[in-house]
Amino acid sequence: MAAPASPTPRDTASATPLSLPAPGGRRISGKIWGALAIVYVVWGSTYLAIRIAVETLPPFLSAGARFLVAGLVLAGLVAWRRGPSTLRVTRAQLGSAALVGVLLLLGGNGMVVLAETSIPSGLAALLVAVVPAWVVVLRAASGERPSAATVGGVLVGIVGLVVLTVPGLSGDVRLSGVLMVVGGTVAWSVGSFSSGKLSMPSDPFTASAYEMLAGGLGCLLLGLARGEQRGLDLGTVSTRSWLALAYLIVFGSLVAFTAYAWLLLSAPLSLVATYAYVNPVVAVLLGSLVLGEALTWPILLGGAVVVLGVGLIVTTERRR
């Protein structure tokens, strides 16, 4: 989830007839489609993993452990494969990476983790569909003029979001959990948008490592401030919660997080943000199959609407 100050695509080779044109006339390569597929599928499955992890693990302490371990492993891999000098950054770059990491992982992911202690994983994933709406608002505030089709796609997504809030308003789930996820999407969107405007480390994997370390430390400190360590007995943590946490570290963080970091360098932000529409489909299916989460009419209808929204946005990007 990191990008340098100028999000210029680094890999313009291997363009195919199915590649989308990026800003400035560049075309998106097959590597971008592969990274986008990882973010679509793997992050869709992390909602289920989070829900299982917080069954017996405290939310912010488990999130802190996840990102601290993943950040340390990633930093070690970067130093091993590319040399320790790759981890050298300026004070400004380190500060920018830390800020983005806190916004993305403490403000964004942390709120979702906390919310999943009270709402279904599929619903949490569907609520994240509001991300492209905030991205468009931020783009407009920075002087860009999103096309009518892009705005239309976002509006369709917002309609789906409204439908998805019905369970919270009706009392079927906690409204506070719904609002936590929406607040988290605002923090995530600001972090994603800011990563392309700040002086970030030039290497996306280095940036990801520092972001995860900063975000993980933030989650750990908040968990301690909330008193999550009181009464915590690691012996009572279930095996499936440990396995879910391990999955989140390896696939949710090391694999998908760094794929997202690279995408922010290489693809239009509005295209990258479409993962928020696809993840819920994966999450809802897994939540229903594994945890038996109910597929109520707001979830089915809202999910169908947000999938339509991603179609509109992708179509718009194809014409750019």
Image (cartoon, grey):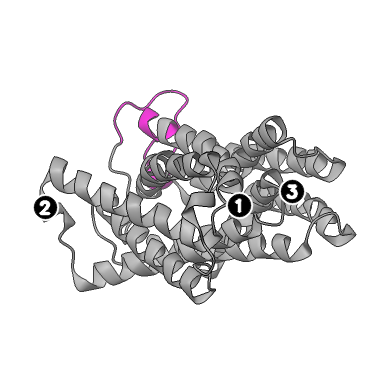
Q: Residues within 10 Å of mark 3 (few under 14, many from 20)?
A: many
Q: Is residue 320 visible?
A: no
The reply, left or right, for residue 22 in relation to residue 151 is: left
Q: Between residues 137 and 21, which one lies in front from this camera angle?
A: 137
Q: Residues within 10 Å of mark 2 (few under 14, many from 20)?
A: few
Real-space CA distance between mark 1 and mark 2, rounded to the nearest whole angstrom: 44 Å
Q: Is residue 31 magenta?
A: yes
Mark 2 residue type: Pro
Circle 2 sits on which residue?
Answer: 84
Where residue 178 appears, as percent x and y from the top left, is 72, 60
Circle 1 sits on which residue?
Answer: 147
Q: Is residue 141 magenta?
A: no
Question: Tag 2, which secondary structure?
Answer: helix
**What is the span of residues highlighted in magenta in the rendered image?**
12-33
Where residue 209 appears, as percent x and y from the top left, is 30, 54
Give the residue at x 23% y 51%.
75
Circle 3 sits on which residue?
Answer: 156
Placement of 2 over or under 33, stated as above or below = below
Give the residue at x 25% y 59%.
201
Residue 32, image quadrant: top left
Instruction: Identify the disc placed on residue 176.
Output: none
Give the residue at x 26% y 68%.
94
